[in-house]
Amino acid sequence: MFSTAQPDVSIIGVMRTALLLTAALAAASIMIAAPADPKPVEPKKAAFSYGDQKFKTYGSPTAPLTLELYTDYECPSCRVMFLDTLPKLMEEYVKTGKAKLIHRDFPLPMHKFSRQAAKWANCAGTMGRYDLVSEQIFKTQMEWSQNGNLDGAIAKVLPPGEMQKLRALVADTKIDEGATADVAQGQRDAVNQTPTLEIVYKGKREQIGGNTPFQLLKQYLDMKLAK
Amino acid sequence: MKRALLAGRLILGIVFLYAAYTKLNAPWLVFAVSINSYQVVPLNLIEPIARTLPWFELLLGLLLLSGLWLRWVGLVCTGLLGFFFVLMVRSFAIGLQIDCGCFGPGEALGPKTLVRDGTLLALSLAVTVFAFLKPKPSPVNG
């Protein structure tokens, strides 16, 4: 009777043409969406008011760059970022007026004591001891992360009188709002790992997750500032 | 064999295009951090690699989809995927807890990513072998 067999060649030819057209369209859209120097990610939300945690903000308010560093006190990569990269950033960008730096807490749920550590640091901040205490918390991470003895770690660097005052502040749960506000901002920024650096330049935000070596960061920031 | 070859190169092409897109759509520093986390590339080479590799992936993706120079494109893809796979296996074996960096940030290197990359490598190898086995079209006599 009738043969239902169709020539394979024409079907493949049509498919091939359609696929090539799709590929060309995909390529064109990628070219448009991704120029050689990609556009930074637009801010997801309006700027967050940082309230009274000014002790976590460093540098000139008019600096062209703003660096927002999210860390978790119990995260080993954050420790490296905080102790190795941050001092260099402070020296070359913050003290020179090129950047403003904001340190934000982002305690991850998997870390048992990191929120408590953030509370100790923030309470110390209200006493003008944020730098000393936050650095000590990171330096002694291996010790207190075993048993949560932050008191013991911090008491090594604070005079007894100040330590007493700090303990009283830590007992006041309200000051924990500092970390809560940071976490809320982190969620608005879609932070999903620590450390995360938000680079804000000309109103646009870019998110860099992971421990970023200073040399790479410097290349990137210098390129931004040269624009 | 013809259809398998077509399907294989289309899948690979789309994967390469997607990989390029996710990297080009973010600041180069994001990919640079991923490269650095593997701890094999010297710091001074990271920026040029982070800025050029995604464009190379884009080119490979387009060539795979078009079917042009398939033998050589297949060889390059297999070499590139093989190199990635060796790096990933090594990093996993020595216990590095890092991002894969394959399709943008936020995907941890683990068994799932290793299986996926291994599968892509096998597919690329198969496409390359099929491309070499396939007879070249004979010239048309006028």
Image (cartoon, coloured by chain):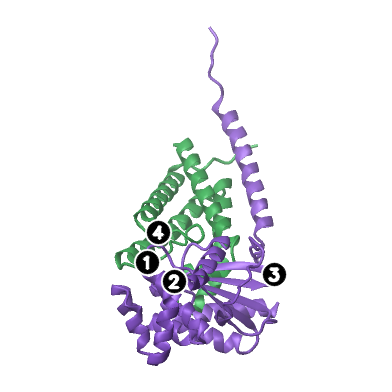
Chain colours: A purple, B green
Pointers 2 and 1 in contact (C-beta within 8 Å): yes
**Above or below, A110 relative to A91:** above
Pointers 3 and 2 in contact (C-beta within 8 Å): no
Where residue A121 sits: x, y (%)? 45, 79
Q: Callout 4, which amino acid?
A: Gly
Chain for mark 2?
A
Foreground of the two, B130 or A57: A57
Report whether residue A110 is seen.
yes
Marked residue nearer the N-terminal end (1 or 3) = 1
Give the left or right position of residue A123, taking residue A94 as reference: left
Check disc 3: other Cα within 10 Å, few if <14, some if 14-19, many if 20+. Answer: few
Q: Residue at x 40, y 91 (%)?
A: A161
Marked residue nearer the N-terminal end (2 or 1) = 2
Report the disc number at residue A72: 2
Where residue A30 sits: x, y (%)? 64, 54
Same subunit under labels 2 and 1?
yes
Residue that numbered label 3 is attached to: A203
* Disc 4 from disc 3: Cα separation: 41 Å
Marked residue nearer the N-terminal end (3 or 2) = 2
User: In what element is the residue under mark 4?
Assistant: helix
Give the left or right position of residue A194, taking residue A33 as reference: left
Same subunit under labels 4 and 3?
no
Nearer the observer: mark 1 or 3; the answer is 1
Q: Residue at x 42, y 80 (%)?
A: A168
**Above or below, A16 relative to A209:** above
Same subunit under labels 2 and 4?
no
